[in-house]
Amino acid sequence: MTHNLTVLGIESSCDDTAAAVLRCSPPGGEIMSSVVFGQGALHAEFGGVVPEIAARAHAEKLDLAVEQALGEAGCGLSDIGLIAVTSGPGLIGGVMSGVMCARGLAAGRGLPLIGVNHLAGHALTPRLTDNAAYPYVMLLVSGGHCQFLLVQAADRFTRLGGTIDDAPGEAFDKVARILGLEQPGGPAVEKAARDGDPHRFRFPRPLLDRDNADMSFSGLKTAVLRQRDQLITDQGGLYPRDRQDICAGFQAAICDVLSHKTRLALDIATGIAGANPPLAVAGGVAANSAIRSALTKVSTGLMAPPQRLCTDNAAMIAWAGYEKHMAGHADPGDLVPRPRWPLDDQSAPLLGSGKKGAKA
């Protein structure tokens, strides 16, 4: 098996159409190009991602993203040795668009094709950016997911805990809507919080009394809604200073919960691994500077990717595909588009299970 490979990655699990080219050689890889076409303008008036609109936009943009990624990398499909594509979890229309595009390219050039779990892409990012050695603890925190993982190999993940309801990114988006801020909510809330007083409103820190690494953010979002309504009732409206202080208090609560639960997750991981594994963070919410700062106080050796690699991108998919390829994985079942695909399928689902399988 060739160790040195140029890999084309494709990602379309939510509302970002992405393609990237990586030049991979042990122990790391070089990002030759990373193209991301966002869909923010398409979904803005709806206050969230509309699956049908997202799927149609992916179908229209995937070939353009691939073409641009190849052009920026200065190569063609003839130079590609492996294609990696997100095959779940995510919005099924977008996932299908990416998988079909990748299948066509692979068939046309006779290239090997690897299906990648989107969450594994985030979880393995420190291997690309920091040459992280196994095992390490990953806090994967995004718009749709929040979980602690002990990462032991490219295909071996042990879930240490996670959210039992809303993910932090979802809570950020909902709080932004409650306060009339723009979407996506994460950057808008963070910006407003910079000028706010985090002590004016004391919001709840759910589940801190439980000796595990599970989290809950739904009640925190509800507390923000009640505080907003109370202010409107008391003073006849909501003022800019109110929004800033609410955002600062909400963000402080998120930071406190993540910090406390991260300490517990590290303790649990030490018991499993028999050593003190380092801490890494990834996912869209990992771009939040206040959260990063709070986590550095938990672990001084925190591995955090550049902000452009925190949000959805195809470079992480290319790297995860390369790692799977080097480990000898070529499972056709991984190329089945799926809306749900837990990394640790041995643990009981945190968010329940239905006909489509466990959510997380």
Image: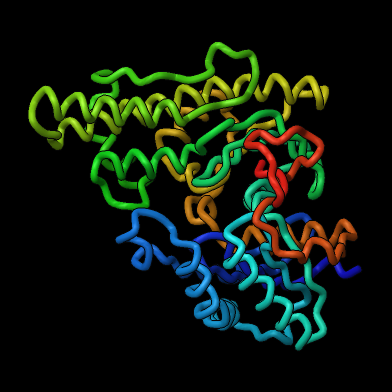
Camera-side residue of 267 and 132:
267
Quadrant position of the N terminus in the picture: bottom right
Camera-side residue of 26 and 52:
52
Camera-side residue of 346 and 154:
346
Whether 184 is drawn above or below 96: the answer is above
Q: Residue furthest front?
A: 355
Q: Residue 327: x percent and y percent?
A: 87, 56
When asked about the image quadrant of residue 5, the answer is bottom right
Determine whether, in the image, residue 282 is placed left or right of residue 150: left
Determine whether, in the image, residue 28 is placed left or right of residue 179: right
Looking at the image, which residue is at 56% across and 28% down? Answer: 300
Quadrant position of the C terminus in the picture: top right
When asked about the image quadrant of residue 329, the answer is bottom right
Determine whether, in the image, residue 27 is placed left or right of residue 261: right
Residue 303 in view: no
Q: Residue 215: x percent and y percent?
A: 56, 26
Whether 315 is drawn above or below 109: the answer is above
Q: Residue furthest top?
A: 209
Looking at the image, which residue is at 52% across and 82% down? Answer: 64
Residue 343 in view: yes
Camera-side residue of 270 and 13:
13
Whether 295 is drawn above or below 98: the answer is above
Q: Residue 240: x percent and y percent?
A: 15, 37
